[in-house]
Amino acid sequence: MKSTTATILSVSILIGCILALVGFASVDYEGQRVNSIEITISDDANSPFLSDLRVREHLDTFGAIIGKLEKNVSFSELHKHLMLIPSVRKTHIYPTLNGTIHIELSQRKPQARIHTGESRDFYIDELGETMELDHQYTARVPIIHAESLESAKNAIDFIEKTKSDEFWDALIDQIVVNSKGELELIPRIGARIFLGSDQDPEHQRRNLLTFYRAQIKTGNLKNYSRIDLSYKDQVIAKRYTY
């Protein structure tokens, strides 16, 4: 009986202590002012659109946060404000009892820049979603010239298929999509490369490398203005006409 009474008493004391701590924390939070903002940006080395300084400059347009009571900071509105930055994928915001607001951001990753002539250029990100250009940073990604976003999809698919291929990644600078949906690559150096409407990146890479090696041996590679890879078992190359 004494043991049971002692146990009940111990539990009551423990519960009382917990309630007291919760009450103290509640009172402490009610009067807690924001004294610092901690910003964490994921994958900032591979997608350098965001920086600590840039996020803080954007926060300045939200209004004063430092010195404000934490309970008076609208975290939902702060979230909406941060999502106005075109390169932000997700935000996670939470306060701590010491007056610090933590902001965790993840970035969108452009895969290509689309130029249609109908409107301003824009990016396509890793999820296939459109993304506004950034006024502070330009992504080094292939440029797709097409009549519309819809007609650019074939080129977007090609970039998606070849993004892990070092050869294509190093070669592609721009892609032109004609009215038939056929692709023509403008490489960083050398002749244009016509891929046609049905692309087989692996097979076309082998054909192109075979052509390059043969022409390099003879010293004739610089004489060609266009290389056609649209045929399965042959490469047709057009020479410059001087």
Image: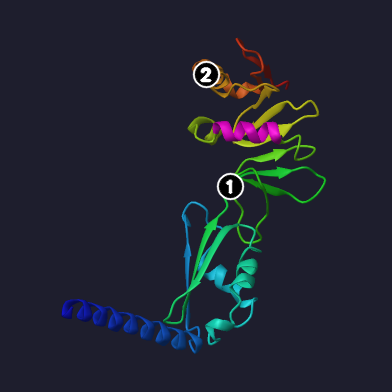
Pick whichever, 5 or 207, lies toward us.
Answer: 5
Task: Point out the stretch of residues depicted in magenta.
Answer: 153-162
Q: Is residue 90 above or below residue 79?
A: above
In the image, residue 95 lies at what x, y percent? Answer: 48, 75
Pick whichever, 57 or 137, lies toward us.
Answer: 57
Residue, far front: 1
In the image, residue 71 lies at what x, y percent? Answer: 55, 82
Q: Residues within 10 Å of mark 1 (few under 14, many from 20)?
A: few
In the image, residue 66 lies at what x, y percent? Answer: 53, 84
Inspect the magenta stretch and tell me whether residue 117 lies in it. no
Q: Which residue is identified by label 2?
A: 206
Tag 1–tag 2 contact (CB < 8 Å):
no
Tell me what residue is drawn at x 64 percent, y 76 percent.
62
Q: Earlier in the sequence, mark 1 or mark 2?
A: 1
Q: Quadrant of the N terminus?
A: bottom left
Compute the Cα span from label 1 to label 2.
Answer: 26 Å
Residue, far left: 2
Tell me what residue is drawn at x 50 percent, y 71 percent.
94
Say which element carries label 1: loop
Q: Is residue 218 above or below residue 129?
A: above
Tell me what residue is drawn at x 61 percent, y 72 percent.
78
Residue, far right: 118
Pick whichever, 220 or 90, lies toward us.
Answer: 90
Q: Main secondary structure of the magenta part?
A: helix
Is 149 situated left or right of 64 in this image? right
Badge number at residue 140:
1
Amino acid bearing label 1? Arg
